[in-house]
Image: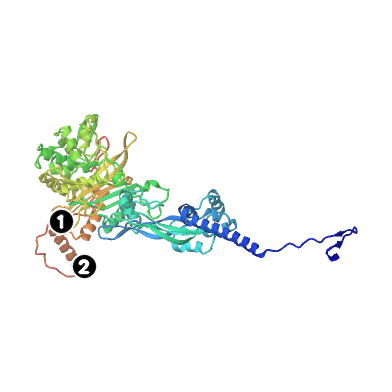
Amino acid sequence: MNFRKFIKAGDGHAKKPRKRAQFDLRLRLMLVGGALGLGAVALVGRAVDLQLIDNAFYQQKADARFRREVPIPASRGMITDRNGEPLAISSPVESLWANPQELSKHPDRLPELAQATGLPLEELSRAVSQRADKEFMYIPRHRRISPVAAKRVLDLGVPGVFSQREYRRFYPQGEAVSHVLGFTNIDDNGQEGVELAFDEWLAGVPGAQNVIRDRHGRIVEHVSLVRAAEPGKDLVLSIDRRIQFLAHRELRRALEETGASAGSIVVLEVATGEVLAMANLPTYNNNRVTGENRDAHRNRAVTDLLEPGSTMKPITVAAALEKGVISPASTFNTSPGWIPNGRFRTSDFRNYGVLDTTGIITKSSNVGSAMIVHKLENQYFYDFVRSFGYGQSTGSGFPGEAAGLFPDPSRWSGTSKQGMSYGYGLSVTPMQIAHAYATLGNHGRSIAPTFVKGHAGESRQVVSAAVADEVVRMMQTVTEPGGTGTRAAILGYHVAGKSGTARKASGGGYARRYLAFFAGLVPVENPRFAMAVVIDDPDTSKGGSTYGGGYVSAPVFQRVMDGALRLMDVPPDDIDTWLAAQATADAKRAREQGRTVPAPSTPAAAPVVSAVQSTPVAATHVAGGQR
């Protein structure tokens, strides 16, 4: 017996020793390998599920977090004048934006950002906190700023602050053309003027691209181009920048000299209806549009309604000539210088006695105009005046253009037609006055005004060419000695025109405040330009005729048209007067230098009209006189 197999226990009894467990390395390796294999299979299966089976689902989830479609801004089309000079251009700028989720995690950087942007810290903190659950916000008042200013902020490295490329509108001519062009808002959409009227044409179509942003909002990859940006189309206006600036300058000069509160000028090309210039005062700078002085944004030439005064008389005469109830040789006894009009009087400045048809226009006789209109039926007179565009839009397409007020004969009182014959009882715009005179200058053919070069407006014959030409010749006497508009005369050119002075309506009556008009055509032989000038509320303290259209508005017409004729190389149609004036000037210089000059070989024409001859303002009817 082997006693070594027994071990004496602590209680003295012998026990048989336990066998040691066998270690199976192979089995353990197989178990571990199997577990790893199953894990690998699970990973592969999961990978297959992610990459193949549910790939679209998980890709969508990833894109939702990191992939974005961002816009590509489109440059707005350029606006130029008729000669290609830029009037409105779009320049690339930067807009600062932030990821509020990221920026709100770094409140300690907000004071630094506020200082760099010039924003109150409280305002910036409030803007960020209000959008803390968003991923995008523009930095207040830092949209469309210069790239240099944007770079100064970005160089601070504030987390969550970025910039993006956009475009900003600039107007090189500033306030001189602001009423025609209008302006765009912060989103580059047209708000007024041509910018609004042609917004769809100018705006273009923004593009888009897919990008991947990191968790900080930074673009790390440009994935694909969704659609390319289409820049806006350029627009060529009928405006001539040189004539526009000239009109703006002379209008400002007139307001300063006369103490007037406002004024408007419209210049049309007679043959095409194209608007060459349209100026208004007060004005504004459309490069810096604010909410202040909104009244200055109004384009008075197409929105303001006013009674046209004596500028109406050539149309009244044309209506009677076309009807055949008078002829150029017809005479009218205007003595004693007034006639009744209901319980009021229609009065002239003085008693002109017997006047022929031309003399009624030359002297601006209210009495003569009243005598003429009484020969016309109400409906005929109404239809004729309407055919010249009064009481309806000119069709220029300018936003906010007023149609005017010209009541139907059924609404006339017993005094209406007589007052209308010399410009009271109806309301028109300065654009309508210029358009009516352009119709006379275009041999009786009306063409809708347009602001686009080469865009022919609607054309129609409204009065016979013979009558229109006859009335234009009658209006020529207004700017010659004895007429009411001699201050509109232009050396070397025959000028046809009509002055007007209308009292302003106020509180159901008429105040001692005036509108001074001059409308005309030049040159008479082949009218190229039609122009209307309106000066609102000139100073009357000097009395006399110093606030009348012949004194206040006619010189503005003279200076603007004199410049326009030379800028457009329009040949003179009164060369004899020019030669006579030149000979007189040469003789004067010779006398000053102690020399003698031979007499001119060409016969001297009529003397040059003095540019300082004053013109009286007409006397009153119920609303006041006019010339």
Residue 352 image offset from top left, x and y in percent:
17, 40
N-terminal of the two: label 2 or label 1? 2
- The residue under label 1 is 607
Q: Residue furthest front?
A: 1
Question: Of helix, strand and loop, which one carries label 1?
Answer: loop
Q: Is residue 251 positioned above or below 325 on the image? A: below
Residue drawn at the location 34% of the way across and 34% of the way down = 507
Q: Is residue 374 positioned above or below 162 on the image? A: above
Whether residue 616 appears in this view of the structure is: no
Left or right: 378 in relation to 123: left
Q: Is residue 343 positioned above or below 251 on the image? A: above
Residue drawn at the location 20% of the way across and 45% of the way down = 436
Left or right: 504 in relation to 527: right
- Amino acid type at circle 2 is Glu
- Amino acid type at circle 1 is Pro
Q: Nearer the viewer, residue 334 or 120?
A: 120
Q: Which of the 4 image quadrants contains residue 584?
A: bottom left
